[in-house]
Structure formats: C-alpha cells, structure tokens
Amino acid sequence: MVLATHQFTLEDYLNYDDGTDTRYELVNGTLVVMPTESRLNEQIALWLLTQFLALVPLSQLGRGTEIAVSGRLITARIPDLVVLSAELAIALAGAKRSLVGFDMMPPLLVVEVVSPGKENEDRDYRYKRSEYAARGIQEYWIIDPIAAKVTLLILETGLYEEQVFQGSDRILSPLFPQLNPTATQVLSAGETQ
C-alpha cells in the first residue's frame, strides 16, 4: 500500500511517525507499507544470520538496517539481512537509527527473501537489483521460496552477474567462500540438516 500524501525527502522519511508499528520503505519519494513477513521468510533470514555469525561479528550484521539508494527520487530500502564491513559497522555504532546514508560506504552484502505476489517479485528482482548495483553493493542474494531458488548477484563493473542455485547446488559466495550451504538448506531455513 502506498501513502501518497506528498513527496517525502529522506529527512521527512526519517522523521515520519504515524503512531503505529507499521514499517515503511521510502520508494521514489513515497512511503510504501512493507508487507508482513511470512514465518518461513523470517526463519530464512534468521537462519542465514546464524550462518554469517560464524564468519563476522554480530556488530556487522543487520536486520532492519535501512539503506539509502537512488531511484527516480529518494529511496530507502530495508533488506531482510545486511552484512556490513567493519568500517561501516563502526560508522553506525551509536547512531540513533540504523541507516546507511549516501555519505557512507555501501554494505558488503544484502539479502532479500521474496514474499508472494507479483509486486514483491518486481521489487526484489528488478528495482532493488538496479538500486543495489548503483549503490555499489558487492553481493545481493535473492532467496525465493516460491520459485525454490537462490539468485546470487555479484557486482562486476557496475552491473550484477547472476548465478542461480536450486536443490543441492552449493551457494558459492565470493565474499564469504567459507559459507557454502545448499539452496535447499537456505530455502528450508536449515531444516534439512
């Protein structure tokens, strides 16, 4: 659902409070209500967080961390999971709000778990793909429980190169080669182990 009251600046978005617990993303200057996550989507993001904990400190992991990206107008995305560099984690330490602004380096990796619906597919596969590439995010994982696949996007000279993993395929991350779960393990939040 879109709230089309007026065009929001990033500052408007950061200061917006409607008195509810509703989560919003800022998309091209417009507040968009974030859909409620399914239990499976939540479990996938949490399971991946536990896997990354073996490789990076908790301070470098984020759930709910916002990222300012470029769109037609200002956009702020909230990925399901973010892996920050040590320097970016230090820059965000003590901040009132976990927002990676334009004046900061990009996260190392973002993960989106696709929710059902065409608009969610478009958002994760099309719009966020171009926004995250333009922001310089080295790896973007799209976990799609509906299509039963994991798409790993690796930034190469400004554009993402795509690899798709399904079933028993091992997901091979250039940034985190020690982390090599199968697509099935990710899609089932580790329940097949």
Image: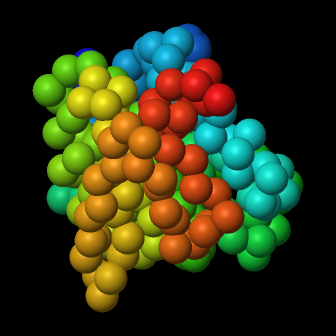
Q: Residue 144 in the image: x percent, y percent?
A: 33, 34
Quadrant holding the N terminus: top left
How many tags in the picture? 0
Q: Residue 94 in the image: x percent, y percent?
A: 85, 55
Q: How is the image coloured?
A: rainbow
User: Residue 85 versus residue 188: which sits nearer the camera?
Assistant: 188
Q: Residue 80 in the image: x percent, y percent?
A: 52, 38
The answer to whether any part of residue 106 appears in the image is no
Please determine whether, in this image, residue 133 is positioned above or below residue 6. Answer: below
Q: Quadrant of residue 3?
A: top left
Q: Quadrant of residue 163?
A: bottom left
| Rendered residue at 51%/65% (across/down) | 173
Give left or right: position of 85 versus 173.
Answer: right
Give left or right: position of 89 versus 23.
Answer: right
Q: Residue 124 in the image: x percent, y percent?
A: 29, 43
| Rendered residue at 57%/47% (across/down) | 181
Please determine whether, in this image, residue 131 is positioned above or below residue 47. Answer: below
Quadrant holding the C terminus: top right
Give left or right: position of 170 versus 60.
Answer: left
User: Residue 116 versus residue 136: which sits nearer the camera?
Assistant: 116
The answer to whether any part of residue 121 appears in the image is yes
